[in-house]
Amino acid sequence: MKIVYLAAGAAGMYCGSCLHDNTLAAALLKSGHDVALVPTYTPIRTDEEDVSQKRVFFGGINVFLQQKSALFRHTPWMFDAMFDSPKLIEWATRGGPSVDAARLGDLTVSMLEGERGHQAKELRKLVTWLRSEQPDIVHLSNSMLLGMAREIAQQVAPVVCTLSGEDIFLEKLTEPFYTEARRLLRACAADVAGFVALNNYYADYMAEYLSVERGRIEVIPHGLNLEGHGRRKPREQTQPARAGYFARICHDKGLHLLVEAVEKLHRQPGFENVELVAAGYLSAGDRPYLKQIEERVRRWPDPGRFHYHGELTREEKISFLQSLDVMAVPTVYRESKGISVLEALANGVPIVVPAHGTFPEMVAQTGGGVLHEPNDISSLADQLQTVLADRERAQRLGQAGYEAVRRLHNSEQMARKTAAFYDSILGKVAPRRTID
């Protein structure tokens, strides 16, 4: 099967969607399929072998220029090509992408308008290339790309789309752009042959959000490349207990809640020395957020009990996770993926996560952790204490998670289910006549 997978790059950021897309493409390639993982907006960034093509469609610079000036909507393709250089795009977006929804409403609507939007020229470039490739199916990495679906489905091949947390951005759009974006999303959804969600929670949520039948959304859990992941070695009884956080450093992911919960835990007898270690991508825009956290920690009796390790390579990530006694990512919003939490479970680390989004489903399926009340510092502190106070229970939770990830969340199984989903889509459509 020949597959073109269009992935939305996130500039220099490690992004859960990019990690998912790259892992899936690599697993499909390994299983014998012909897969082209093609970045849009910016190159993708992953901590595994990058299997994406070294070209970018809908390059972020051209998309921006065409939104702001009619002149750039009519420039020759050869002229545009110099702005689509991956190195130039990476330079222009250094420090992290601009994702302020309040400022991107007009661009969001224009992209969803597809062939009628300001970026119509970029869509023509993509369709021209796709017709030369003649894929059997085209996979969009998220619904923000749905403006492409009609032209691709009519001129190239059936389109499927992954649903991967885009509502978090959309819900921050201002009017009139929010209402128009929601209308366009629902209209564009009709051009898609099928959708994929990583869990039942998000499939149910997005069925209503996009006004599509729930039966059109296939649930295919994320699968990890498990190479290198393994059981953590239990820490010595004499060592201070260590709680960990591994996710993007930002308000939405809730590191500030975890800091306050550990601070509260320090006031409990026997938990005065609990360490909190954090790691993950930090954008320029989120540095003030981390600074506020560090200023708070400096008021702790022992500020050395907190340490931010920065961005990590794959090997460093696994080592970091295996050093933890418990992992917590107390997201403020309803998480749709939770990939870093799965990675903790893959190393036998028990998890403490909020009872919203995908997490209740994840805990129920894996048995690898416990839930706390969302946005409730006392509840988070209490659940951390219950896990850290009983090392035998923590070991049982970690072991259950370790086994469940290998059974339910491996990349080979994800690739098999995705290929079967493609086959089911292709079985419902008539053979496509090659267009000269």
Image: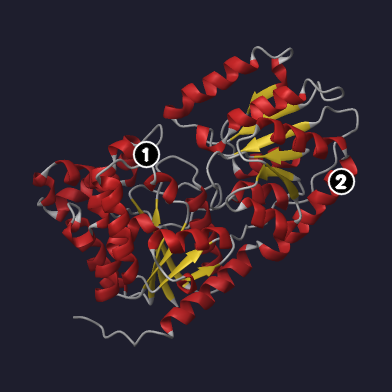
Query: At which x and y percent is residue 30?
Result: 56, 68
- Looking at the rendered structure, the kind of residue marked 1 is Val
Q: Which residue is under mark 2?
A: 393
- Give the quadrant of the C terminus: bottom left
What's the distance in space between the residues labelled 1 and 2, CA to CA? 41 Å
Left or right, 37 with respect to 66, comes to right
Question: Mark 1 packing: few (<14 Cα in 10 Å), some, or many (20+)?
Answer: few
Query: At which x and y percent is residue 84?
Result: 26, 48
Query: At which x and y percent is residue 135?
Result: 36, 74
Q: Is residue 323 visible?
A: no
Q: Which is more toward the observer, 32 or 233? A: 233
Q: How is the image coloured?
A: secondary structure
Find numbered disc 2 in the image and state the secondary structure of the residue it sits on: helix
Find numbered disc 1 in the image and state the secondary structure of the residue it sits on: loop
**Residue at left 22%, top 51%?**
110
Question: Mark 2 packing: few (<14 Cα in 10 Å), some, or many (20+)?
Answer: some
Q: Which is more toward the observer, 281 or 429? A: 429
- Looking at the rendered structure, the kind of residue marked 2 is Arg
Left or right, 117 with respect to 222, comes to left
Left or right, 15 with respect to 58, comes to right
In the image, which disc is placed on residue 99?
1
Callouts 1 and 2 close, C-beta under 8 Å: no
